[in-house]
Amino acid sequence: MRQALHALLLASLSLPTMAAPHALEEVVVEGRKTPLLGLARSASEGVVGAEDLALRPLLRPGDVLEAIPGVVVTQHSGAGKSNQLFLRGFNLDHGTDFATWVDGMPVNLRSHGHGQGYTDINFLIPEMIDQLRFVKGPYHAELGDFSSAGGVHFETRRRVEAPTVSVSAGSNGYERLLAMASRAQESVLTGALEAVRYDGPWRDVEENLEKLNGQLALTRETEAGRWRLHARGYQSRWHSADQIPARAVAEGVLHPLGALDPALGGRSHRFSLGVDGTLRTALGVWTAEAYVIDYRLRLWSNFTYGLDDPARGDQFEQLDDRRMAGGQGTFSWGEDQPLTQRLGIEVRSDVIDNVGLYRTVARQRQEGFRDDAVDQTSVALFYEGALSLSPRWRSVFGLRADHYDFSVRAADRLNSGGARESQLSPKASLIFSPSETLEAYLSIGRGFHSNDARGVTLRIDPQSGNAADPVDPLVPSTGGELGVKWSPRPGVNSALALWQLDLDSELLFVGDAGNTEATRGSERWGVEFNNFWQLTPAWRLEADLSWTHGRFQGDAPEGNRIPGAVPFVASSTLSYAPSQGPFATLRLRHLGAYPLAEDNTAKSRGSTLLNLALGWRWPRLRAQLDVLNALDAEDHDIDYFYASRLPGEPEEGIEDLHFKRFEPRQLRATLTLTL
């Protein structure tokens, strides 16, 4: 494969969507070694840099999100599908309460065929990530929908220093080829091309993942600012072994790596074109971003096997075919004043030509439960100011206003209709700096997630035909946090945060429908303790702990536990990375046991995963061996508890644990040549 072109320049100054509003000047942030003292608005925000990601062993692209302290990434389906995410006691499903952006483009998909806020970052090339900025909690005015638990903004590299080719091969038919390069004259043209194949370790089905991913960007910088034009293209197809019932494994009917339906899997593509720019004037700094995106997913799943249709089985297809367009702009001023301010606007339109749910047999459609078209438009205004009260005290305050329009054209005309709703979200933080090495934060704010437009206009259940109640268009959340950041010396920092979050309605997975439903409100509180030590120029250590208490609000006969609410997460990464010679990274992640039923009678056992990377670097060549699941643990990647039916079982099925196991230990070798 020839060298191709990729990339992206983030044209906004120090990432306006995540940077503190008083930091108008460009600030060089190197990653987790930078404590953000004087810049952060809360204790639980930070930056992960390319250096932090460079040697991290990855099973899948979505694993880069685990560089955010407290985030856990799992998978219950095939390698081409969006990952399951856990953070702060949320089973975020595929991103319902965690907002994700890549170079100014939103990734979360509203009213999606598989799940609200569906977040698929398989189009990201890890080597092209320059840094990611993350925040937790609803305290940041620039973040709106899907941001109750927090959000992340990925910036990709503006240029590749030298043409690079990387070739990987490994267990279970893994093959990967990556080429990236830049050409610089008055402007910089940067690009990359990635191709991946993977069969997977499953006994009854080969994943046959085939992925092609390309990116291209043209960037120009001047004294007054910079602009960028960028294009991306991603497509993939795969088969999958989804979660399986524990009773089938216990009875010897099925291997733990087996599958009950070999015709599951999916096909997806995402193509985008974007432009962004930054202009510094005497009045202040202007930024603007605009994008258009074409996206499509066809996904075949079967969670209940023969519960609804014993003769044909319960396989179903979910379809999402949409176009998106939107953008955002900000104006920041008062750089040299005690009060610095930022005003922003954000617009987005999702035109979903077809979002559907169909009964299928061997991927062939039999009948449809939903076959709808959706138009969803939103506009938001936000203001944020940072006021220096004294040399030791500063405050950040903001207000965000969101307005949504929903329009559904359903196959069943009774479920067609429209709705509108608006929300005001105030935010505020008070920061005290007793010394140059310590800051304390008190943060409060309101956030929200939108609900699926089809649920907003729902009148008749499409499967049962019974009357159904619509859900609220917007679901607010309210949270607060008290914390500190401490950096006693360069390269060493810690953050401690005590936080609380109330959500008016949860979204929970429903196995027999293959979707999520709105449930009761919830309340969570917890503690996070994150640490980074640059022990020597070559040695670095990360250690992060997170504990959460989560319950549904009120008392109910079925119980108040929140299924999927993980109470404890611990992770640590130890790296040895000199500029030349041998290097190594050891990554340990533990996910504590968590409830699977509201009465807590069913629980996941939790899991522990160890990954290892070993290698050697020469001036123009790097060799790396990744050992994934190095201890060959047989823990579960993810667990669910619901009713399903196998041949010969009662008509009502059997409620049981359904799980997907860790992929067994595998090796992946990579050679990277810099020309």
Image: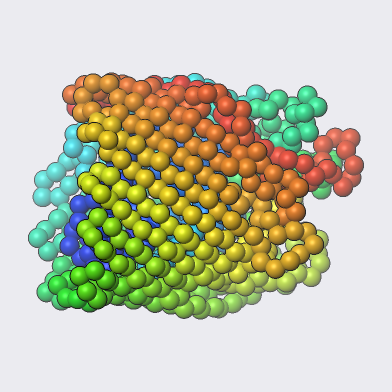
Q: Quadrant of residue 436?
A: bottom left
Q: Residue at x 36, y 58 (%)?
A: 484
Which of the pair 59/31 is nearer the observer?
Answer: 31
Q: Position of residue 630 (x, y in %)?
A: 49, 24
> Farthest residue toward the front?
434
Q: Quadrant of residue 554?
A: bottom right
Q: Quadrant of residue 39?
A: bottom left
Q: Quadrant of the C terminus?
A: top left
Q: Position of residue 53 (x, y in %)?
A: 34, 39
Residue 87 shows up from this direction = yes
Which of the pair 172/596 is nearer the observer?
Answer: 596
Q: Is residue 339 left or right of residue 371?
A: left
Q: Residue at x 45, y 24 (%)?
A: 627
Q: Residue at x 78, y 33 (%)?
A: 247
Colour pattern of the rendering: rainbow
318 up-or-down from 226: above or below: above
Q: Is residue 279 left or right of residue 111?
A: left
